[in-house]
Structure formats: structure tokens, C-alpha cells
Image (cartoon, rainbow, N blue to C red):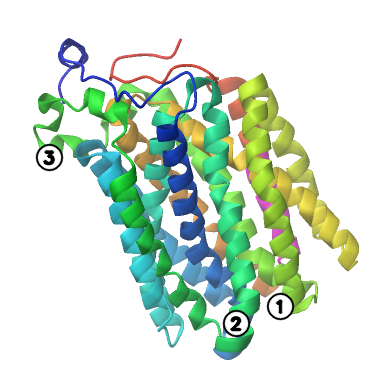
Amino acid sequence: MANIEAHQARPAALNPQFDSERWTPYSLNILLICILAWAFDVYEQTIVQLITPILIKEWNITPAVIGNITTVSRWIGLIGGIAFPVLADHYGRKPILILAIVGYSLCSGLTGFANGPMQLLIFSSIARVALAGENPVGQIMVSETAPTKWRATALGALIGGYPLGYLLTTLVAQWVVPVWGWRALYWIGILPALMVLWIAFSIKESPRFERVSTEAFRGSFWKSFNLMAPARKYPREMLIAVLVNLFYLFTWIGWSAWMPQFLATEKKLGFQTMASYLTIWMAVAIFAYYFCGWLCDMYGRRIVIPAFLIPSAILLVVLGYIDDPQKLFWVGLVTNFLITGSFGSGLGYCTELFPTEIRGTAVGSAFTLGSIGASAAPAIIGWIATSHSIAAALPLLAISFLCLVPIFAWFGHDTTRKELLDFVGEKHS
């Protein structure tokens, strides 16, 4: 990789459509496309969560089996979590984003042919390679093109594609499952491939990537696979990014994977009531991402993120002790609002810690390392649920969220409204 002086000597011109101070049609278009990509991404991830009660009954398996399938498939998917962002540092953000969307769309349809736990594991693992790759590449693309003063809001809006995708899945599930069964949910997941045509013709490459991707930087394919470069150049930032991914994803994956089973079976609400609860929760959560991102841009992450994390951790524990359906709905609504709200701007923070030159490699490595531990959440909760209950595992998710508080409050750089770094060697002020 060429040194910083070489890059600064020959900077490429920034895309004239890009403006770091204000929204433009270019930056808004990229944000919208990436939001939809995340929405369809989480659509596939959510299917198995919603149909868990159905699969347990149809295949006569235990919650621990579903938990193991979810965890192992996520571990296998980490191949994409590190490979796609690294490729994005070499070939660009746009083509790798297209590749990831095509991959998870087609593989989602394949999962609908699973006839048992082993086939479900194999097909869902293949799909997750592309799914895990799309997440960080989309974050990087939005981080590099959003206006500096509204970057936290943009990142919050992007990851707001999660509740949008969850909402879409619950709505489709209520209509499709009773008529055509759970397999149709996967086959409908092929539709996102149509987005690729829009992406191919409507957006240009990230201007920050174009600026640093000189011939010296593109010169050697294997230099882009220097996975240790972020840890060597930015050890503190790398540790923070890994921990942020670990604790955020552990709570989110555990929460989203087992909430349908928790509501439908443990709290005896049934499939239709569970799906309607989650539909409303996720519809409200879309606003939570924008709201928390806006607050972060106004007041900084040091104050806002802990203000979301602490009450959500408390309510996670409280939720396990509630049996009344009405109280369960309202407490769950507030809990989900707080969990999802901080998730967007908090997880997106990792893209701001590293320079453009190695941003994909750094974010992909941090996402992968954090996900190794976080992906164990479905299995751990499944084991606890098999022996005790899902409610008994909720305090574990709360502890994971509380571990994020000191990171944002004291140890991490507050990068809100600060210009992104572009070249290796630059430091945060």
C-alpha cells in the first residue's frame, strides 16, 4: 500500500455531485438504495426467526436445535463479513454492494427448498455469506457520501432498514404463511435482485474511495488483504470497533432471534398476535433510528447513546416478568424503540474511526471479530430456553448492552460532525 505522501501528491478529483456540507440528489439516492438493501437483507434473516415456532412443531425439534442452526450459519457467514469489505477496498464500494445483493437474493430463494434442519443450515449459511458482506459495505458507502454534519442521522437511517425489513417480513408472513406456508417467504426474497439494475445505472462510486484509489493503491491485489494493517495503524480504534460490534450484535441478534418464540409460545400469544406485535414494534422502530441519529448529530454520541442503552437494558430484564398481554405490548414497544434507536448510530460509528484507505478492511475485520462472539447469542439463549426459559436469558442481553456505556461515554472518540479521515497516518483530533 502506498504511503500517505504518495496519495496526497496525486489526489483524484472528488465527484462533483458530492458535497460534504449538504444533502444532494447523489447522497440521498445512495442512502435510499442502501436502506432498501439493508431492508431486504434483514428480510431473509428475519424469516427463520418468525417461523421458529412452526419449524419446531413441523420437524419435531427443540429450541436448542434452531439456536444452533442460527449460530453456526452466522459463523459461516462471517466469511462474507470480512471478504466483501476487503474487496470493497480494492475494487470499490459500488460493484461489491451489487455482488452482495445478487448473492443474498438468489440464495434466499434456495433456502425455501430446505427439508430438514441440516438442509436449512446449509442453505441459510450460503445466504449469510452474502448477507454479512452487504451490511458493512452499505455502512461504508453511506458514511463516505453523507454530509458531515448529518452523518450520524444518515447512518441511523441506513440501519433503520433493519426494522423496515422486519416490518416487511411480518406483514408478508401474516398474508403468505397461512395460504402458501413458510417456504414462500424465502422465494419472495429473490425480488431484491431487481434492485441491482437501479444501482448499476443510478449511482457513482464513493468519491472518497476514488480519491485514495491511485494506481499505487490498486497495484497489488494481495495488499488489499493485509488484515493486520488496521490493528497495527489504529490499535485503539480497532479494539473499540470490535467491542462495539460484539456487544451491540450480541444483544440485537439474541433479541431478534428469540422474540417471536418468546411472544408466541412462552407468553402464549400465538403466531398471529406475535406477528402483529412485532409489526407495530418495528414500524415504530423505524422512527427510532432517525431520532437517535438526529440527537447524536445535535448533542454527540457520548451523551445520547448511553441515554438509550441504560433504560433499554433495564426494560429487557423487566420484560421477562410480564405476563399481561397489554403490558407486554407496551413495555416491549418501548424496549424495542430504545434497542433499535441506539443500534443505528452506535454501530455506524465504527465506519468513522478509520481512514478511507483501509475503511473496508477495518470495518469488515471488526464486524467479523465481534460477530464471532455475538453469533453465539441464539445458541446460548436456545440452551437456556431449553433448560429454563427465554425470559431467564434476557438479563444476559441486558449486560451486553450495559458494557457499551463506558465505551461511548469515556473511551471512544466522539467523531460526530467531524470530517472523515482518508489516508493511513492521519489521526483523530
Q: Is residue 393 magenta?
A: yes
Secondary structure category for the residue under label 3: helix
Picture residue at 27% right of the left edge, 27% below the top: 357
User: Which label is found at residue 271?
Assistant: 1
Which mark is on residue 221?
Answer: 3
Could you classify mark 2 by the number of other residues whose Cα lies within 10 Å: few (under 14), some (14-19), or many (20 or more)? some
Say which mark, if any, is on residue 58: none
Q: Amino acid at mark 3?
A: Phe
- Identify the amino acid type marked 2: Val
Q: Is residue 190 left or right of residue 215?
A: right
Give the mark, 3 or 1, whose residue is nearer the N terminus: 3
CB contact under 8 Å: marks 1 and 2: yes
Q: Is residue 318 magenta?
A: no
The nearer-to-camera label among 3 and 1 is 1
> What secondary structure is marked by label 1?
helix
Q: How far, Cα to Cα, is label 3 from label 1? A: 50 Å
Instruction: Name the residue type under label 1.
Output: Phe
Q: Position of residue 280 (x, y in %)?
A: 74, 59
Where, by quadrant of the figure, is residue 216 drawn? top left
Magenta segment = 390-402
Judge by depth and name the residue closer to the eye, 312 or 329.
Answer: 329
Q: Is residue 84 visible?
A: no
State the image coordinates of residue 163 (x, y, percent, origin top left): 61, 54
Secondary structure of the residue carrying numbered label 2: helix
Residue ID for mark 2: 177
423 or 323: nearer the eye? Answer: 423
Q: Nearer the viewer, mark 3 or mark 2?
A: 2
Q: Are the residues tagged 3 and 2 within 8 Å (C-beta)?
A: no
Task: From the viewer's perspective, tell me whether residue 171 is left or right of residue 420.
Answer: right
Q: Nearer the viewer, residue 199 or 140?
A: 199
Tell me which numbered mark, 3 or 2, is placed earlier along the sequence. Answer: 2
Mark-to-mark CA distance, 1 and 2: 10 Å
